[in-house]
Amino acid sequence: MALARRSMMEGGMHELQGACWKWCSKGTYVRSLVYDVGRALGTVAFMASLRRDAIGDFHVQDAWQLQDLISHLRKARDQAQEVEQQDEH
């Protein structure tokens, strides 16, 4: 874990912000890990965000952009409708 910034909050409490990258297998409870880190430091901890970059062979960099997916689905729908219309005649 890398601490990115330490700042004072109202009331004099310290806030530590950091980033953590973890490669883990299925069944790893990342939120529980963050909770445990807070307890080990004698305080509380929470996550502002959680991003899964891969699941098995599926990776974020291989994902479709939403607009591309919509275009692909519309094209497939239009082709299916053309086939149905040809079958009706």
Image (cartoon, rainbow, N blue to C red):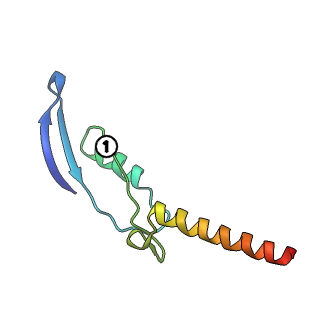
The residue most toward the front is 89
In the picture, the quarter occupied by the C terminus is: bottom right
Q: Secondary structure at mark 1?
A: helix
Q: Position of residue 83 (x, y in %)?
A: 76, 76
Residue 34 locus on image (x, y percent): 34, 49
* In-front residue for pair 85/3: 85
Residue 12: quadrant of the picture? top left
Pick whichever, 8 or 52, lies toward us: 52
Residue drawn where x is 22% and y is 57% of the image: 1
Q: Is residue 40 left or right of residue 88?
A: left
Horizontally, residue 52 falls left or right of residue 88, namely left
Q: Residue at x 28, y 46 (%)?
A: 40
Q: Quadrant of residue 62?
A: bottom left
Badge 1 is on which residue? 39
The number of numbered badges drawn on the structure is 1
Q: Is residue 36 above or below residue 28?
A: above
Density class for disc 1 (Cα within 10 Å; few <14, some 14-19, many ≥20) is few
Q: State left or right for residue 78 relative to residue 29.
A: right
Q: Name which residue lies at 17% across and 23% down.
A: 10
Q: Residue furthest right?
A: 89
Q: Nearer the viewer, residue 68 or 87?
A: 87
Which amino acid lies under the numbered mark 1 shown in the image of this protein?
Answer: Arg
- Residue 76 found in image quarter: bottom right
- Pinpoint residue 68: horizontal percent, then vertical percent: 48, 66
